[in-house]
């Protein structure tokens, strides 16, 4: 095979790229980016759905600066993790799980890996020596390590069979095209697929079910039918299987509540993973929360070694940045925040039924606009010309559905949201005129 050694410079940086030009950003403030050509563009996707409190936060800066002056490193096994303990307590309070134990790691993927390790240790300490399997849905993303890619059901990023360690997703999600339920007319019997998956493996082999309570970027902001998560929890409890919620994307108010699972009663998971909204783009972080009735098992004399260590885990500058993010979140006017979520939902829902738009769904500050095939990049391009950018998804079904994830920073103002919805609506209209 001929190999041209002269890759363009941009391609030598081995990261994802879009079929549109990168933005040349000279400065950023809140949800706005200033470009080298003088234009301003609104961040309609919070970067990679993480810049939840906007850019340039003084609260984050001052927390990091304070800690930097004190010390810039302190391994948790050597130096008292005072700031990390403060973060643990603030975070647990913020998500309504005040007595949880917490593992701090360096990204969402590692959060998922550590949650799996912790779950396995817990079920084994409870006597389930053979329990190892982790069951996921066929429409899910749980990170980019070889292990989490193999485990999850992200069609686009699935590894080849020979690279997947024999792993794969185990049950269909409660979403189209597998399940065509609409809210209100569904009895959540689709959760029985989880029971079937556990029983076919043999419950004695299963450690946990891992799922996104609200789908992020694989299907595009699908919300499960009422009753689904409750039924999954009941199914798992009856079989002594743990429930792990991956709230890497949805955690810390993205969907309008501290955790996405708070939209329903009785669905608190055993373990919960947070990441994007906690670091908010300022720091690499993942946090795994473990329920207080289970965490002591991890410290039991007979327990396996704790799978939660790492050179940069529990880093003081990371903790400082996260505390600054929590300062920002707690300073938000929550009534105004909820009103902005409703404004966003109403503005986006008005696009449903327009030529080119197949569906609009989501909640809080997390929505997807699903498009007719082939329209994703033309719409993105047009929206960017109108001064807003979004995150693309290519998701469920065959051919795969496609569209944009709309997820502005939680601190966006009414004017910001109206800029977003107007720019997007004009882009949809312009496309219809062309098509
Ligand atoms: C639901 C979910 N889980 C895990 C991850 C992985 O997080 P990270 O990219 O921080 O490793 C992501 C990232 O998009 C995600 O959306």
Image (cartoon, grey):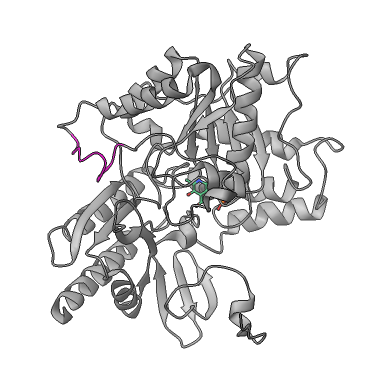
| Residue found 49% across the figure and 52% down from its top | 158
Asked if 78 appears above or below 418 in the picture, the reply is above
Asked if 49 appears above or below 98 in the picture, the reply is below
Asked if 345 appears above or below 27 in the picture, the reply is above
Q: How many marks?
A: 0
Whether residue 297 is in magenta: the answer is no
Q: In the drawing, does residue 275 fall left or right of residue 239? A: right
Residue 402 screen position, x and y as percent:
31, 61
| Residue found 12% across the figure and 59% down from its top | 353
Whether residue 177 is in magenta: the answer is yes
Q: Quadrant of the C terminus?
A: bottom left
Q: In the drawing, does residue 164 fall left or right of residue 261? A: right
Which region is colored magenta? 174-183
Residue 351 screen position, x and y as percent:
17, 61
261 or 207: nearer the viewer: 207
| Residue found 37% across the figure and 24% down from its top | 196
106 or 1: nearer the viewer: 1
| Magenta-drawn stretch, dominant element (helix, strand or loop) | loop
Q: Residue reaching furthest front? A: 1
429 or 330: nearer the viewer: 429
Rendering quarter of residue 350: bottom left
Rendering quarter of residue 287: top right
Residue 206 screen position, x and y as percent:
53, 23
Residue 339 screen position, x and y as percent:
28, 48
Q: Quadrant of the N terminus?
A: bottom right
| Residue found 73% across the figure and 18% down from its top | 303
- The answer to whether residue 275 of the structure is visible from this angle is no
């Amino acid at each position: 095979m001929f190999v041209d050694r002269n890759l363009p410079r941009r391609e030598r940086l081995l990261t994802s790229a879009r079929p549109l030009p990168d933005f040349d950003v000279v400065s950023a403030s809140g949800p706005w980016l200033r470009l080298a050509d003088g234009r301003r563009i609104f961040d309609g996707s919070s970067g990679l759905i993480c810049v939840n409190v906007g850019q340039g936060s003084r609260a984050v800066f001052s927390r990091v600066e304070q800690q930097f002056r004190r010390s810039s490193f302190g391994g948790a096994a050597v130096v008292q993790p005072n700031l990390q303990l403060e973060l643990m307590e603030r975070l647990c309070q913020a998500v309504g799980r005040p007595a949880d134990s917490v593992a701090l790691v360096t990204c969402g993927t590692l959060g998922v890996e550590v949650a799996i390790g912790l779950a396995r240790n817990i079920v084994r300490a409870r006597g389930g020596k053979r329990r190892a399997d982790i069951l996921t849905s066929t429409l899910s993303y749980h990170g980019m390590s070889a292990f989490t890619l193999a485990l999850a059901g992200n069609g686009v990023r699935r590894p080849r069979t020979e690279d997947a360690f024999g792993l794969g997703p185990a049950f269909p999600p409660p979403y189209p095209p597998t399940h065509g339920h609409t809210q209100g007319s569904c009895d959540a019997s689709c959760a029985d697929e989880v029971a079937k998956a556990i029983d076919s493996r043999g419950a004695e082999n299963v450690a946990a079910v891992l799922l996104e309570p609200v789908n992020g970027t694989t299907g595009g902001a699908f919300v499960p039918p009422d009753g689904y998560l409750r039924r999954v929890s009941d199914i798992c409890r009856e079989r002594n299987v743990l429930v792990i919620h991956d709230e890497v994307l949805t955690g810390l108010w993205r969907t309008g509540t501290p955790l996405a699972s708070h939209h329903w009663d009785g669905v608190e998971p055993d373990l919960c993973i947070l990441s994007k909204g906690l670091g908010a783009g300022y720091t690499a972080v993942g946090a795994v929360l473990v329920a207080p009735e289970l965490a002591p098992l991890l410290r039991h004399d007979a327990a396996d070694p704790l799978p939660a260590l790492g050179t940069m885990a529990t880093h003081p500058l990371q903790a400082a940045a996260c505390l600054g993010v929590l300062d920002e979140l707690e300073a938000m006017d929550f009534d105004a925040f909820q009103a902005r979520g409703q404004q966003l939902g109403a503005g986006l829902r008005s696009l449903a039924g327009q030529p080119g738009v197949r569906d609009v769904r989501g909640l809080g500050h997390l929505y997807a606009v699903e498009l007719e095939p082939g329209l994703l990049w033309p719409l993105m391009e047009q929206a960017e010309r109108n001064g807003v950018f979004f995150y693309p998804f290519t998701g469920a079904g065959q051919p795969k559905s496609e569209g944009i994830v709309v997820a502005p920073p939680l601190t966006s103002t009414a004017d910001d949201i109206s800029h977003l919805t107007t720019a997007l609506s004009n882009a949809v209209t312009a496309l219809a005129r062309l098509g």
